[in-house]
């Protein structure tokens, strides 16, 4: 209940008003039998029944207004609670660290935002109020029933038929708005899941805020349709309730006439009214709200679990003050000093020291599990070192905002996931302000210009896993990375899914980038890195050796085995024997 109250607390004023309105509405219902008795008593005296009948009509009208207001108020509060819960989770997901996100199934995270928040709505807004109100109504009904005999059960069936008829007429409009709301929720879940799969690209592009705002557009639209559905539901229920009240008023008039004619006992008429007004409603209300409350409590706990996600604490206001100093800098652009890092459990890197020069091509090779991709994750600050330090231009990462580090780097990850959107939006993901000429130049460099031009919508073609091949997806990611020459380009198996002709073009692109800045590549296909300025050989999370291809082939057994296994030794480095 404490967790549930944490969601409801910001709306406690509206909830208090809702409770007061509920109790007032219940009071009008409990008062109705007494006014009915007044009507009946007037029949046996010289008093005109017009006064009590008007009073009964007044109670009906006042009750209708109260319930309509209360329904819209609590329904709107419920939708606001859902929006706030979704907003807090979406923003936290994109601020969370990579290990915190990747250790949970993506579908589970999406469910927290979509389904769990819907279950939370009723519990945090109206269920507790409904329970309190139901108990009050039930207690009042039982007190009145204690002095009466139950009769005229057939009238209850008539009331149910009235409700069914009214709902059959009003429900289509409600269902339409609910369908629109669920459609928006579905779109929200789809875009969110895709973006979370590409969380490294989002962070490398410093697009956390922009991506969150894009997703929350669907969340806000779902809220708009949800509020409309709530309003229509309120009208439907209040019209149905008023219809029952009107039907009872008609039966009362008919019953009063029959009592006057001596055909019906007054006590039988009063008992009917007590049943109709007081018995069925609180029982139904209690059962419905208890079910909603139990589901909401479970959902609230699951949603609050997301607060435990570790987030990247950034100092955005200091980012500009800590930006790269002007002028030419000496020394390495990146440096790792005795770094140990991992994702929990045994470290993936152990006491690694490495220097990345300001210009040139550095390749990282080694068998699977050697720690190559972890090193790139460390440089991108997706993981933080357990010990040791990482430096950018001689300044430790710990003293720099995340955005400042990633502004200087470009990253093409191994899986090259698709960020939901068009080809243009994917290309501009890191640099939204890039010009058309810059985009065309980047596409030409990775040999995608003809492919994009052949598409019906060109750059505005929606990008999906079925619209492009794995190799084309890799080239789009590379084009995004080189759209504006960064200080350091990090490539994780950038040529794993391309043909030989495209691989040659990417090699030329890497050579051009290496002349202007630093390029760090990870590759299993050693043919892509043998011409690197420096090749770093890793094994079991440690740097085993480093040097040129010729030096390593002559001096390092593991490197020679890797080369021989792929049969790529050149004439200057013949394979022994």
Image (cartoon, rainbow, N blue to C red):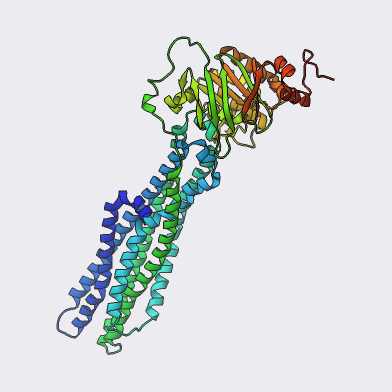
Residue closest to the eye, 285 or 242: 285
- How many numbered marks appear? 0
Q: Vertical placement of 313 versus 157: above or below? A: above
In the rendered view of the protein, which quadrant contains the C terminus? top right
Which residue is nearer to you in this view: 451 or 485? 485
Residue appearing at x 14%, y 83% in the figure = 46
Farthest residue toward the left? 46
Taking the view exactly as shown, the residue that stands out farthest to the bottom is: 262
Residue 184, image x and y in percent? 48, 46
In this rendering, would 407 be left or right of 255?
Answer: right
**Residue drawn where x is 26% and y is 56% of the image:** 17
Q: Is residue 536 visible?
A: no
- Name above or below for residue 116 compared with residue 330: below
The quarter in which the N terminus is drawn is bottom left
Residue 458 versus residue 83: which sits nearer the camera? 83
Residue 39, picture quadrant: bottom left
Q: Is 268 above or below relative to 247?
A: below
Asked if residue 143 can be seen in this view, the reply is yes
Q: Position of residue 232 (x, y in %)?
A: 38, 56
On the image, the x and y values in percent for residue 516 come to 56, 12
User: Compared to 86, does 365 lie above or below?
Assistant: above
In screen coordinates, is 383 left or right of 401?
right
Residue furthest right in the image: 577
List x then y, in percent, for residue 134. Answer: 33, 68
């Amino acid at each position: 209940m404490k967790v549930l109250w944490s969601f409801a607390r910001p709306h406690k004023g509206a909830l208090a008003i809702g409770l007061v309105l509920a109790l007032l509405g219940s009071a009008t219902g409990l008062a109705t039998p007494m006014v009915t008795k007044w009507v009946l008593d007037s029949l046996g005296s010289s008093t005109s029944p017009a006064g009590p009948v008007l009073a009964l009509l007044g109670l009906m009208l006042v009750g209708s207004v109260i319930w309509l207001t209360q329904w819209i108020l609590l329904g709107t509060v419920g939708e606001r609670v859902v929006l706030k819960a979704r907003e807090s989770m979406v923003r936290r997901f994109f601020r969370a660290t990579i290990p915190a996100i990747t250790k949970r199934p993506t579908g589970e995270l999406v469910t927290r935002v979509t389904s769990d928040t819907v279950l939370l709505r009723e519990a945090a807004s109206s269920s507790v109020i409904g329970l309190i109100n139901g108990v009050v109504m039930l207690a009042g009904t039982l007190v009145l029933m204690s002095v009466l005999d139950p009769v005229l059960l057939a009238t209850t069936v008539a009331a149910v038929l009235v409700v069914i008829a009214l709902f059959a007429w009003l429900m289509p409009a409600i269902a339409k708005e609910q369908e629109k709301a669920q459609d928006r929720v579905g779109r929200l879940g789809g875009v969110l899941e895709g973006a979370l799969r590409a969380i490294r690209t989002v962070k490398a592009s410093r697009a956390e805020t922009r991506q969150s705002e894009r997703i929350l557009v669907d969340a806000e639209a779902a809220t708009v349709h949800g509020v409309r559905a709530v309003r229509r539901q309120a009208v439907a229920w209040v019209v149905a309730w008023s219809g029952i009240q009107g039907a009872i008023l008609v039966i009362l008039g008919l019953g009063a006439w029959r009592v006057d004619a001596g055909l019906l006992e007054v006590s039988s008429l009063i008992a009917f009214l007590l049943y109709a007004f007081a018995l069925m409603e609180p029982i139904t209300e209690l059962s419905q709200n208890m079910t909603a409350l139990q589901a909401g409590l479970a959902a609230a706990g699951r949603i609050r679990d997301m607060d435990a996600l570790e987030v990247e604490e950034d100092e955005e206001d200091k980012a500009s003050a800590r930006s790269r100093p002007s002028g030419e800098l000496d020394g390495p652009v990146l440096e790792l000093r005795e770094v140990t890092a991992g994702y929990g459990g045994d470290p993936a890197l152990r006491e690694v020291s490495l220097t990345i020069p300001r210009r040139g091509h550095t390749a990282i090779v080694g068998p699977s599990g050697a720690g190559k991709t972890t090193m790139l994750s460390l440089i991108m600050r997706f993981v933080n070192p357990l010990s040791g330090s990482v430096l950018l231009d001689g300044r430790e990462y710990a003293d720099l905002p995340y955005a400042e580090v990633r502004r200087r780097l470009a990253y093409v990850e191994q899986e090259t996931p698709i960020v939901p959107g068009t080809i243009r939006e994917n290309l501009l993901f890191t640099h939204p302000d890039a010009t058309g000429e810059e985009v065309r130049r980047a596409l030409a460099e990775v040999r995608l210009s003809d492919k994009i031009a052949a598409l019906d919508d060109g750059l505005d073609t929606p990008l999906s896993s079925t619209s492009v091949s794995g190799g084309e997806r890799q080239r789009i990611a590379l084009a995004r990375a080189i759209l504006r020459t960064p200080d350091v380009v990090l490539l994780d198996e950038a040529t794993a899914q391309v043909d030989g002709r495209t691989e040659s073009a990417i090699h030329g692109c890497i050579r051009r980038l290496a002349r202007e800045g630093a390029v760090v590549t990870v590759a299993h296909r050693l043919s892509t890195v043998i011409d690197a300025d420096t090749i770093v050989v890793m094994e079991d999370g440690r740097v085993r050796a480093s040097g040129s291809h010729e030096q390593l082939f002559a001096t390092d057994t593991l490197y020679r085995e890797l080369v021989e296994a792929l049969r790529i030794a050149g004439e200057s480095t013949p394979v022994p024997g």
